[in-house]
Image (spheres, rainbow, N blue to C red):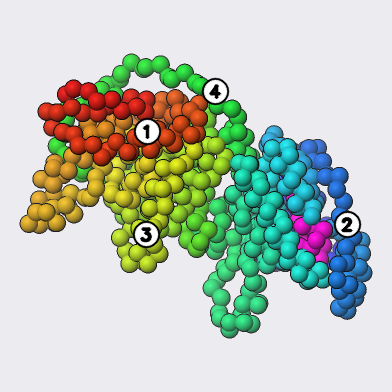
Amino acid sequence: MTTTAPRDEQLWSRCDGCSSLLYRKRLRRNLDVCPECGSHARLDAPDRVAQLVDPDSFTPLPDRAVRVDPIGFVDALPYPHRLGAARTGTGLDEAVVCGTARVGGHPVALAVMDFRFLGGSLGCAVGELITRTAERALADAVPLVLVTASGGARMQEGALSLMQMATVSQAVAGLREAGLLTVSVITDPTYGGVAASFATNTDVVLAESGARLGFAGPRVIRQVTGATLPEGFQTAEFLLRHGQVDLVVPRHALRGRLTALLAAAEAGRRVPVPRPEPAPRPAAAADAPGPARDAWETVRTARHPGRPTTLDYLETAFDGFVELHGDRLGADCPAIVGGVARLDGRPVMVIGHQKGHTTAELVARNFGMASPAGHRKALRLMRLAARLRLPVVTLVDTPGADPGVDAEQQGQAAAIAENILALSVLPTPVVAVVTGEGGSGGALALAVADRVLMLEHAVYSVISPEGCAAILWPDSSAAPQAARALRLTAADLCRLGVVDEVVPEPRPAAHGDPAAAAELLGRAVTANLAPLLAVPPATLVRRRRQRFRRFGAARAVDGTGPRDVIRNGTRTEVAP
């Protein structure tokens, strides 16, 4: 916003985005967001603190910035003169305000950068103050929230300013090792050494609407490469599409998003208390098992376009979903969705395949077939859940992983393999539900779990019936025969021990009554998750490994030989 008078005396401001003349008091009431075009004006650090934290909860750290001039830098003015002018102009000691506070009732350590002070540049004093804030978070066992606004490392302090990138990153690493949440809030602009360190190496990266983030600025890129930059280059929305940030949040919603993340992190650190399993509910008509269906008919039901998707279940069976985006390597695969939600009041990390109901939705989501970026996004969220001690719930509904050329070039096989490996050692409870199609390795990448559930009319197989028929029969017209031979229904897989429980569906199937299907799914996941919550992590991992180790034993599946039944994570051989 453009103004001419000192800020406290301003009556009107002109929006830099749409040039509208705005009444200053109205603009302030709207959190300095233009009511005409939505452009977000830059905030100074004190205003940002006031907007984010609970009233009267901010306490500055006792540490004060040390005046430094490590290399005696002089350009048009000696460096100490520039520091003095910045202090006079901003009323701040340095380019960051640090302290402790509460956000939505949750304690945090907070560092907020101020672009007015020498472009928010990262020098020795700024690095020291942010590092001490991180160390305070570690000492108090609370999350760290960093609000960034910077042009990069401070040139007037030479290589010592460069070292601050590593210094602050080490402090963030210490919090990660301790399982404490770290969140960066990217505001406009965030560039250079700040962007390439603590702005992007936190657990969660939120970006305020319209904020710009990058290592090199657009002017430098144009000068060096001569390239024409794409529209919206380096804006928050551009970065979201390219998998670099978890969320783009308008200013008015920022505090709420932070509160939801902090609530999940706080709940994860509480000592688990065994909770009684829900009492059995009298079976309603919708819960009663129906007559056995033909396998091919079940395949067709599992693929029904009206069948509830992961996002449908997140809206109905779960509460308070905060979606997290991106693999942080260059893409955000729409076929995988994930984030923090609540189930029966307990925060969980939910990750699932997302198809859609219409042709346009299915195409946009690649029919639920995840790319390597999707699997890497899932991997990132699994590991974040483990650090925050949150249970993981996965919802599986995919024909298989993306079989395209690009996916192969980007390492599809290795991405799936890494997910399977990570789930095998993840030190937090994992419950997987096959809700529709469970296709091959793309399904297993989300289904190495302590408890594997399967909806009554879902399927789970090493290959699609059509693919199996094309390879082993004369042509794909034998798909119905292949479906029966593959033993891919929930009842078949429960007999094999691959699935621990079949979740009933309302009649005729989940697509007929999505709300009832969501209730049944939520109840089943809650019941299966409850006994896992108090199990020590080492025991969880050991039992999970034992569960999959035993699949090597040969057994009959036609009811003529002994079979295995899994009860509470323990496999027992029983007579047919």
In front: 8, or 558?
Answer: 558
Quarter holding the N terminus is bottom right
Judging by the rendered image, the residue that carries numbered circle 3 is 412
User: Which residue is rendered at x = 72% and y = 57% of the image?
Assistant: 167
**Label 4 vs 2, first from the N-terminus:** 2
Is the Cβ of the residue at disc 4 closer than 8 Å to that at disc 1?
A: no
Distance from disc 4 to disc 1, alpha carbons, whole Å, reads 19 Å
**Label 4 vs 3, first from the N-terminus:** 4
| Local crowd size for mark 4, using a 10 Å CA cut-off: few (<14), some (14–19), many (≥20) | few
Judging from the image, what secondary structure is the residue with disc 4 in? loop
Image location of residue 532, percent across then percent down: 45, 28
Q: Is residue 128 above or below residue 255?
A: below
Is the Cβ of the residue at disc 4 closer than 8 Å to that at disc 3?
A: no
For the record, the magenta segment spans: 109-127
Q: Which label number is shown at residue 451? A: 1
Distance from disc 3 to disc 2, alpha carbons, whole Å, reads 50 Å
**Label 1 vs 3, first from the N-terminus:** 3
Distance from disc 1 to disc 3, alpha carbons, whole Å, reads 26 Å
In front: 398, or 248?
Answer: 398
Q: Which label number is shown at residue 66? A: 2
Q: Is residue 312 visible?
A: no
Q: Which label number is shown at residue 273? A: 4
User: Which residue is rendered at x = 86% and y = 55% of the image?
Assistant: 65
Q: Is residue 411 magenta?
A: no
Q: In this view, does 573 lie above or below 181?
A: above
Distance from disc 4 to disc 2, alpha carbons, whole Å, reads 46 Å
